[in-house]
Image (cartoon, helix red, strand yellow):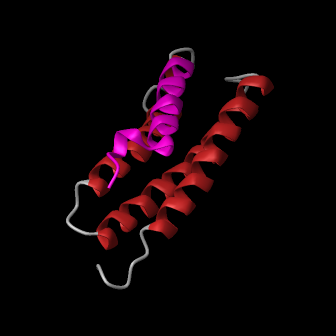
C-alpha cells in the first residue's frame, strides 16, 4: 500500500491547511478563539485523520478515518463561505480555496470506495 504522504489527497489537504493558516493570520483578533480556531482545526483534521487512519490495523478502520476527514472537508467548505461573507477574504481567494476543498472531498470519496473490502474488516 502507498504511503499516505504520497497520496494526492494528502498532499492537497496539507496544502490547503497551509493556505488556511496563512489566510487566518489576517483574520480579526476577536475571531482568534472562534472562526480562526475552527477553520484551522477543520483544515488540519483532514490530513491528520488520513495519517491516523493509514496507521490503523485494517482497511475498515482506515475507511472510517477517511469518512471523518471528509466530514471535516464539509465543515471547511462552510467556514470558507462564512469567512468570505464576513469579508475576511475576497471572492478570488474563496473560490480558489473552495475548489481545493471540493477536490479534496471528491478524492476522499474515491479513497473510501477503494478501501471497501469485505474480506478485510
Q: Can residue 34 be seen by looking at this rendering?
A: no
Quarter the C terminus occupies: bottom left
Q: Is residue 52 visible?
A: yes
Name the outermost residue toward the bottom. 118
Q: Is residue 3 above or below residue 28?
A: below
**What residue occupies the far front of the structure in this picture?**
1
State the image coordinates of residue 48 (x, y, percent, origin top left).
Answer: 34, 44
Most distant residue in the left direction: 57
**Which quadrant would residue 81 be assigned to in this image?**
top right
56 sits to left or right of 16: left
Instruction: Name the residue furthest top.
Output: 26
Bounds of the magenta span?
1-24
Pick the residue in front: 15 or 91.
Answer: 15
With 60 as the anchor, is 101 left or right in this view?
A: right
How many circles with numbers are drawn on the protein?
A: 0
Residue depicted at 35% across the width and 51% down the height:
49
The percent coordinates of residue 1 (x first, y second) are 32, 55
Identified at 42% across, 59% down, the residue is: 66
100 or 93: nearer the eye?
100
Name the main secondary structure of what is drawn in magenta. helix
Residue 56 placement (x, y as % from top left): 22, 61
Q: Position of residue 84 (x, y in %)?
A: 72, 31
Between 11 and 79, the one lying in front of the other is 11
What residue appears at the point 29 percent right and 79 percent down from the top-left corner? 120
Based on the picture, tell me whether residue 76 belongs to the magenta stretch: no
Q: From what the image shows, is residue 67 above or below residue 99?
A: below
Residue 10, magenta (yes or no): yes
Taking the spot 42% from the left edge, 68% from the top edge, the residue there is 115
Amino acid at each position: 500500500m502507498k504511503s499516505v504522504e504520497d497520496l494526492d489527497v494528502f498532499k492537497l489537504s496539507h496544502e490547503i491547511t497551509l493556505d488556511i493558516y496563512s489566510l487566518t493570520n489576517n483574520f480579526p483578533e476577536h475571531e482568534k478563539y472562534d472562526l480562526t480556531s475552527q477553520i484551522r482545526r477543520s483544515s488540519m483534521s483532514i490530513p491528520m485523520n488520513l495519517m491516523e487512519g493509514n496507521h490503523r490495523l485494517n482497511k475498515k478502520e482506515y475507511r472510517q478515518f477517511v469518512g471523518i476527514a471528509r466530514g471535516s472537508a464539509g465543515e471547511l467548505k462552510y467556514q470558507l463561505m462564512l469567512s468570505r461573507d464576513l469579508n475576511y477574504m475576497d471572492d478570488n481567494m474563496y473560490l480558489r480555496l473552495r475548489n481545493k476543498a471540493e477536490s479534496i472531498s471528491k478524492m476522499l470519496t474515491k479513497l473510501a470506495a477503494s478501501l471497501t473490502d469485505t474480506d478485510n474488516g
